[in-house]
């Protein structure tokens, strides 16, 4: 079952879809996941929808939602700020915990790419989350961007663009808009994995927000709650080292899985049969849909 709904976050209405497994029985309290979409993306037709549907088939409830300023949610379109998204994820949990189908003590958080960074940070500052699964996430904004713009020439061009955006804001009071691919390069062949509802232009302030966002600083706070860092082994979009460093800084129980033979989207159809089984194995061990008696 999928139910379209909205919830409040700092006075804004956020659009969401709640997934409830068909096997759910009246009165049963389900474990659940908050599912965070990627960089200026959408809850719909995206990796977030794939993640939510996977959780539903595995016996979990899942709430996928559009962050403020994205998708069908309220807020000035594309004016994304990292700590606003952390607030949205926390408010999503507050909303979901009140649903009669949900066990409020067993709500995890997951996300992909930017959504994974937000998930790790949010679990690090909010003890209500029972576990976290980070898919191709990042923990240190500036170092991530250096990996995405690896040559001296590319880095100079990237920083020049951001400085130009900062000066434009000072001079006009308005945002300078840039292509999302100027901030986060994605090869043409992989862009098909983006949601058709994803935003294609962003304000420079969004990139500055990401530069200063460091889930690494709070990842150790997640323990003793379980954490999984799931990343493609040679990620050409979000550098794989980001999950390596998150894992190194995390307390136990934490696991790191590196997936060979695929790109930045490990749940894409050609890889999903294998990668979903890997995720199920971790869930069965650390956050089972049916707790042991």
Image (cartoon, rainbow, N blue to C red):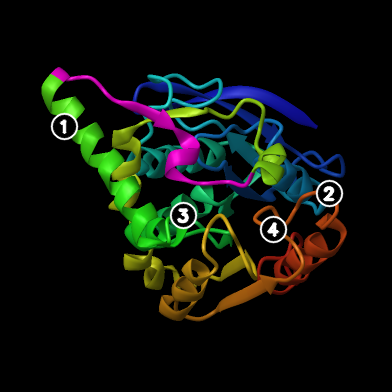
Residue interval drawn in magenta = 172-187
Residue at the disc numbered 1: 167
Mark 2 or mark 3, whichever is nearer to me: 2
Residue at the disc numbered 2: 269
**The label number, if any, that marks residue 15 in the structure image:** none
Residue 128 shows in this picture: no
In percent of width and height, residue 249 lies at 41, 77
Quick one: label 4 or label 1, which is nearer the N terminus? 1
**The label number, if any, that marks residue 263 in the structure image:** 4
Quadrant position of residue 132: bottom right
Quick one: label 2 or label 3, which is nearer the N terminus? 3
Mark 2–mark 3 Cα distance, whole angstroms, equals 23 Å
Q: Residue at x 56, y 55 (%)?
A: 237
Circle 4 sits in a helix, a strand or a loop, which is it? Answer: loop
Residue 140 shows in this picture: yes
Circle 1 sits in a helix, a strand or a loop, which is it? Answer: helix
In percent of width and height, residue 258 lies at 66, 73
Quick one: label 1 or label 3, which is nearer the N terminus? 3
């Amino acid at each position: 079952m999928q139910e379209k709904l909205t919830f409040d976050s700092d006075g804004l209405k956020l659009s969401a879809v709640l997934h409830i497994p068909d096997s759910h029985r009246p009165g049963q309290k389900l474990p659940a996941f908050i599912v965070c979409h990627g960089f200026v993306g959408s809850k719909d037709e995206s990796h977030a929808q794939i993640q939510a549907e996977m959780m539903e088939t595995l016996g979990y409830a899942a709430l996928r939602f559009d962050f403020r300023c994205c998708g069908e949610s309220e807020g000035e379109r594309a004016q994304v700020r990292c700590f606003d998204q952390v607030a949205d994820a926390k408010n999503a949990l507050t909303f979901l915990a009140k649903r009669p189908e949900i066990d409020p003590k067993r709500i995890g958080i997951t996300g992909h790419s930017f959504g994974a960074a937000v998930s790790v940070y949010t679990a690090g500052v909010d003890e209500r989350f029972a576990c976290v699964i980070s898919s191709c996430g990042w923990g240190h904004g500036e170092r991530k961007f250096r990996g995405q713009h690896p040559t001296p020439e590319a880095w100079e061009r990237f920083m020049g663009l951001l400085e130009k955006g900062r000066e434009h804001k000072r001079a006009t009071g308005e945002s300078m808009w840039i292509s999302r691919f100027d901030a986060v390069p994605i090869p043409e062949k992989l862009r098909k994995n983006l949601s058709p509802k994803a935003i294609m232009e962003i304000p420079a302030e969004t990139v500055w927000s990401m530069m200063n966002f460091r889930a690494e600083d709070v990842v150790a706070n997640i323990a003793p709650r379980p954490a999984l860092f799931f990343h493609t082994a040679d990620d050409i979009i979000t550098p794989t080292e980001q999950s390596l460093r998150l894992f190194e800084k995390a307390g136990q129980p934490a696991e790191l899985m590196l997936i060979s033979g695929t790109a930045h989207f490990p749940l894409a159809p050609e890889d999903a049969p294998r990668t979903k089984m890997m995720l199920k194995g971790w869930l069965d061990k650390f956050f089972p849909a049916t707790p042991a008696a």
